[in-house]
Image: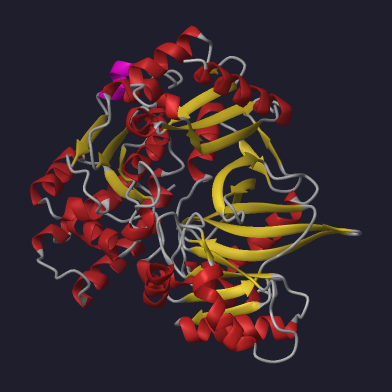
Amino acid sequence: MPDPGKFQQQRASKKSARDYSFSPGSMEEIEQFKLQQANFRGQYEAVFPDHGAPKTIVIIPSLTLDQQILSKIKGHVYYEERMLCMLLLLRMPHTHVIYLTSVPVDPIIVDYYLHLLPGITGYHARQRLTLLSCYDSEALSLTQKILQRPRLIERIRRSIPHGHLAHLACFNVTPYERTLSVKLGIPIYGCDPDLYGWGTKSRSRQLFRDCEIPLPEGFEDVRDQEEMVEALAELKRRNPLLEKAVIKMNDGFSGEGNAVFSYLGAPIETGMRNWIRKQLPGTLKIVASDMDYEQFIGKFEQMQGIVEEYIEGSNKQSPSVQCRITPLGRVDVISTHDQVLGGESDQVFLGAYFPASQEYGSEISAMGRRISEELRDKGVLGRFSIDFLSVKEPFGWKHYAIEINLRKGGTTHPYLMLQFLTDGEYNEQNGVYYTANGQPRYYYATDNLYSERYHGLTPIDLLEVAISNGLHFDATLQEGVMFHLIGALSQFGKLGLVCIGDNVEKTKNIYRNTVDVLNKL
């Protein structure tokens, strides 16, 4: 096994990145970042297999996404709490965790996670946990806020114990995270932002074709309203029976950058383009709330995007495959989920069942692995997910690859929670998750449990209700419910749940029971 001390000595012997004054996005900064990432392979070999090795993980749960679209999601600043499940890394006795947030996390919420640590006292874990905050709830990504605070960056540096190898764990990696990585002089376990294009809607379609994976009929690299009209008209020409099409911004997320166009009333032979041009402003169904047509078109022209057919089906599912590429180049298929989509046109992510149906779990896993191998060859690193649409046909399921998300997402934190609590793993071949003692486990997870009656409930109120009604995770049975997004509850009436059981029906019962209890408050 590689010697961790050797890599620490190498790091100490080189002039630290903090001694340089790189301009954000400069060639010098990019070269330094690539050097840090290249050295990460040795660090990974040295400390990741050894649970007793001294190491520090700096967690940056920043949703560094388009802030205009992100603002449509209620309580989005509290989505930074979704990665609190990574506090369970403190079960490794010599691991330190530094967790950054825009606003402070209530200590009661932190205690809620730490009490789950097996074989570790809360006191021991707290000695190895550093919570830092920007004390800033403005509509700006967490990483940008950190970069505006040089003293906070210095506190992060000082919080990394001497002799520890450290890396950043981020929700997604953009040039902002790259700048922070270089300022701290530590690598990121995530994708180089220069490769982020492969996570856009347009480049996803290109890669699916290269992998010979089926995808919806459509067009990528659509730049403006006129090209949107041309694409919609051509789709209808190719398939006269097509009833709807989906328009997606390249960097949209959770369906919030999507819109659905209906061909109802379209002319049969001539005048299709003019008809579409006239219909678009009045009939385009935009998923993002409070975004009108002019705003949508303006944002689309800024991001550009795709136009593709709306996949129909009487039995249609929306599975996803979560994968990971390690610094050693190994591809892991981590999980599959059946996503629950809602909204008027079923474009909004509401939650997910784990694992995906065994009828097709292994099929989409194989497709996910093929896509991941192509991404690996392009240099991609870290966790990401691939979304599909699957339609039941007379002789089986037909799968369409929809998009690649080169970041963590709505299915990442529930799976991490399950894995940390049960020490198990997903079996790619049969599509089942097994705990460390060989027992199957399933869950239903959501970030979108909402009710007006939840407004005003504080974290301590929620936990008192949970304790009084047995709403908890039973470590002996390895079943129960875990809450997240707790900070969003009082102001926004919004909460997240992960309901874990030994069969699908039990996860549904745990969810229904939890909702029934909360709705009686």
Where is residue 443? Give x, y as percent. Answer: 62, 33
Q: Which residues are magenta?
A: 121-126
Q: Is residue 316 left or right of residue 192?
A: right
Does the magenta portion include 48?
no
Where is residue 251? Give x, y as percent. Answer: 43, 66
- Which residue is at 33% across, 63% downward? 174
374 vs 334: above or below: below
Q: Is residue 64 left or right of residue 180?
A: right
- Quadrant housing residue 85: top left
Using the image as rendered, state which of residue 50 and residue 309 is in the foreground. Answer: 309
256 vs 28: above or below: above
- Which residue is at 28% across, 38% downward? 99
- Which residue is at 37% across, 16% downward? 461
Q: Is residue 492 visible?
A: yes
Q: Main secondary structure of the magenta part?
A: helix
384 vs 97: above or below: below
Using the image as rendered, state which of residue 154 and residue 355 is in the foreground. Answer: 355
